[in-house]
Image (spheres, rainbow, N blue to C red):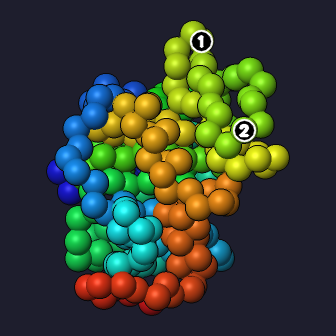
């Protein structure tokens, strides 16, 4: 972890910290060749958070590594403060991973956030890795009606600022909301999300991370480096 901060903050203190950290997020590409991409998801059950990080070969989208971590949830549910509820356990899983992915794709927001610091931007900044937010729902902003063709997208706007894109990944299904996390631009984010889709609404990174967060173990290819905290 490159940056760190206390997690035991009040919601008011967390809002202030988000505003400060948002100024450090890099909105331009700073990533090399992407050979691996990781999906990140968190499930919460009975006040226990379980984070899953699944690394896939980018070319074939085949899982090669994964890690999970468990941690009690101590931060209350507050809209816009998801990173303070789930961030610590995500960092635990990343630390246990045993490899450094070239790109992270979060099941959550990046800049498409009221203070421009969703979980993809927050954690991407802390670990200083390229990160993308690919959320299933909209947290803020507005957009016009989107075309039905897969690959169609349009800007997600908030007070005249482009904060992300609404992206159709499959015909006749709801779009996803893509935004910059850290060290990528929006065009790059859209391109990698589409490249990780294989006929489903959600990219394979998210689909695998969701399965592992729910308790499934992926069949691994290559260096089968895996860590569990059960």
Residue marked by disc 2: 149
Judging depth in this view, the residue of 225 and 6 nearest the camera is: 225
Horizontal arrangement in the rendering, residue 227 relative to residue 89 (left or right): left
Judging depth in this view, the residue of 63 and 213 nearest the camera is: 63
Whichever of labels 1 and 2 marks the residue nearer the N terminus, that label is 2
The circle drawn on residue 159 is 1
Q: Considering only vertical position in the picture, is 223 above or below 180?
A: below
Q: Nearer the viewer, mark 1 or mark 2?
A: 2
Judging depth in this view, the residue of 13 and 228 nearest the camera is: 228
Residue at the farthest top position? 160
Q: Image point 53% across, 72% down: which residue?
A: 208
Marks 1/2 in contact by CB < 8 Å: the verdict is: no
- Give the quadrant of the C terminus: bottom left
Horizontal arrangement in the rendering, residue 118 relative to residue 79 (left or right): left
Judging depth in this view, the residue of 170 and 68 nearest the camera is: 170
Q: Image point 82% across, 46% down: which residue?
A: 172
Residue 129: x percent and y percent? 26, 50
**Mark 2, other Cα within 10 Å: few <14 / some 14–19 / many ≥20:** few
Can residue 83 be seen by looking at this rendering? Answer: no
Residue 60: x percent and y percent? 42, 68
Q: Considering only vertical position in the picture, is 204 above or below 191?
A: below
Which secondary structure lies at badge 1? Answer: loop
Horizontal arrangement in the rendering, residue 182 relative to residue 167 (left or right): left
Q: CA distance from mark 1 to mark 2?
A: 27 Å
Q: Image point 29% across, 29% down: which residue?
A: 28
**Mark 1, other Cα within 10 Å: few <14 / some 14–19 / many ≥20:** few
Can residue 22 be seen by looking at this rendering? Answer: yes
């Amino acid at each position: 972890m490159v940056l760190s901060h206390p997690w035991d903050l009040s919601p008011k203190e967390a809002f202030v910290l988000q505003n400060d950290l948002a100024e450090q997020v890099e909105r331009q590409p700073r990533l090399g060749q992407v050979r691996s991409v990781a999906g990140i998801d968190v499930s919460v059950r009975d006040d226990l958070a379980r984070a899953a990080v699944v690394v896939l070969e980018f070319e074939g989208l085949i899982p090669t590594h994964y890690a999970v971590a468990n941690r009690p949830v101590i931060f209350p549910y507050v809209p816009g403060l998801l990173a303070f509820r789930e961030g610590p356990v995500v960092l635990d899983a990343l630390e246990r991973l045993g490899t450094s992915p070239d790109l992270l794709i979060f099941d959550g927001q990046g800049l498409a956030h009221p203070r421009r610091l969703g979980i993809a931007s927050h954690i991407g900044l802390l670990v200083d890795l390229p990160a993308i937010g690919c959320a299933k729902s909209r947290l803020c902003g507005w957009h016009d009606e989107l075309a039905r063709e897969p690959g169609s997208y349009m800007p997600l706007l908030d007070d005249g600022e482009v904060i992300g894109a609404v992206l159709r990944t499959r015909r006749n299904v709801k779009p996803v909301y893509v935004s910059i996390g850290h060290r990528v631009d929006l065009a790059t984010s859209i391109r990698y999300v589409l490249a990780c889709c294989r006929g489903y609404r959600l990219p394979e990174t998210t689909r695998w991370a969701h399965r592992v967060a729910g308790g499934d173990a992926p069949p691994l290819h290559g260096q089968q480096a895996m860590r569990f905290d059960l």
